[in-house]
Image: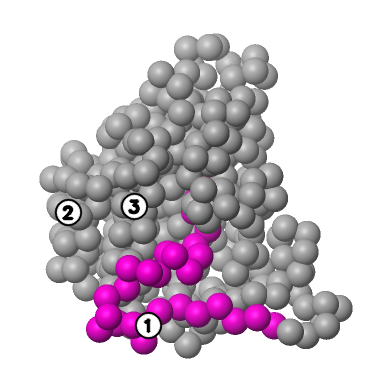
Amino acid sequence: MGAIDADAHVVECPATFDYIDDEFSQHRPRIVTDTSDESKLSPNNAGGVQRQYWMLDGRLQQKDFNAGQEMSRENREMEDIGARLKHMDALDVDLQVLYPTLFLRPWTQDAEVEYAICKSYNRWLAEIWKQARGRLRWVVMAPLMTMDKTIEELEFAKANGACGIFMRGIECERRLSNPYFFRLYEVASMLDLPICCHAGNGSFAIWSVYGDETGIGRNKCSVIAAFHSLLREDIPAKFPALRWGFIEVSAMWVPYVLNDFMLRLRRKGIEMSDTMLADNNFFVACQSTDDLDYILPYAGEGQLVVGTDYGHADNSSDIEAMRKLREDGKLPPEVVDRILSDNARVLYGL
């Protein structure tokens, strides 16, 4: 079994929205170009300037702000799936699990807009999966403001290559431990689709508090807080068949959060299990820069996966992460094999 990239990305393009139903055509996102002199444009993560934006539900959202330069636009936007598969071969990656890019941030508070966009995105990913001969799996975008529509989308996605459900640390201005999501978790359990909590948040309020700080506050902390609140409120015990992934937030925080949780339990006279992640079906995506010797005793050898953040250019991006983990010699080969392949197969039900 080859390596599984547990966190790769598509970069949305006009084709993403070709599947919007005619009745919702007014919600189709448009690309807007800033024609100002280059000296007046803001920089982007890729070392260039921010010239293009999506107009989505009346808001401007940066386009290609985070686009990785190690791969072509055709690869990032899935225009040339054959080229993407060849690049995966060169990286010793057998399979990628695809996450969105545009939707890592809050993007609408309108249930109709959310449904129209999510449905089109999911049809686009289903077509990508069909063309990729099983090597490009994906996480479904659920229109969480309309739970009946969410269930429909989950059923479609399960039948068309999806292997997880995309969520951010905050959704619908609620924590993931909120009972509002329990119906989602019940159906996810029945369909054998894990909840994949990816870096990002869906709260306009939190997004605005952090201003132009695009890293830990806006995108990472809410995922770590979700991990903690799910444990504290014993949500996994209510859905024992459900698996949970915490993606693109490194794994260095796991010892800290578990230590905090241990202290809270001890105040109640309860000793914490040594296998908390496994007990709760929790999986965490590590990075090539993590101190895995330190993390593994806390997380467990069966609960870490690894992703490259393929398609992006930020602190989490490392398209050579799989090869580095195998070649650096710091961990026993059998542990490396679990992190590179076996654990991801369990998390995503592959």
Mark 2 falls on what kind of element? helix
Any part of residue 292 in sight: no
**Residue count near mark 2 (Cα–Cα under 10 Å), binned few <14, some 14–19, many ≥20:** some
Q: Between residue 217 and residue 78, name the one nearer to us.
A: 78
- Badge 1 element: helix
Considering only order in the chain, which callout, 2 or 1, is on the residue closer to the N terminus? 1
Q: Which residue is mark 2?
A: 155
* Marks 1 and 2, how far apart at CA: 24 Å
Q: Position of residue 348 (x, y in %)?
A: 32, 37
- Badge 2 amino acid: Glu
In the rendered structure, which amino acid carries the disc numbered 3?
Glu
Per the image, the residue denoted by label 3 is 127
How was the colour assigned to the protein in this rendering? one colour
Quadrant including the C terminus: top left
The stretch in magenta equals 8-34
Residue 183 % position (x, y): 15, 60
As measured in the structure, the alpha-carbon distance from the residue carrying label 1 to the one carrying label 3 is 21 Å
**At x 56% / y 48%, what residue is drawn?**
75
CA gap between label 3 and label 2 equals: 16 Å
Q: Nearer the viewer, residue 145 or 264?
A: 145
Does residue 275 appear in this view?
yes
Report if residue 205 lies within the magenta region: no
Q: Is residue 262 above or below residue 195?
A: above
Number of marks in the rendered image: 3
Label 1 or label 3, whichever comes before in sequence order: 1
Left or right: where does residue 169 sit relative to residue 306? Answer: left
Residue 313 position, x and y percent, is 66, 52
Specify which label sits upstream in the sequence, 3 or 2. 3
> What residue did someone put label 1 on?
27
Q: Residue at x 49, y 62 (%)?
A: 12
Give the residue drawn at x 25%, y 83%.
23
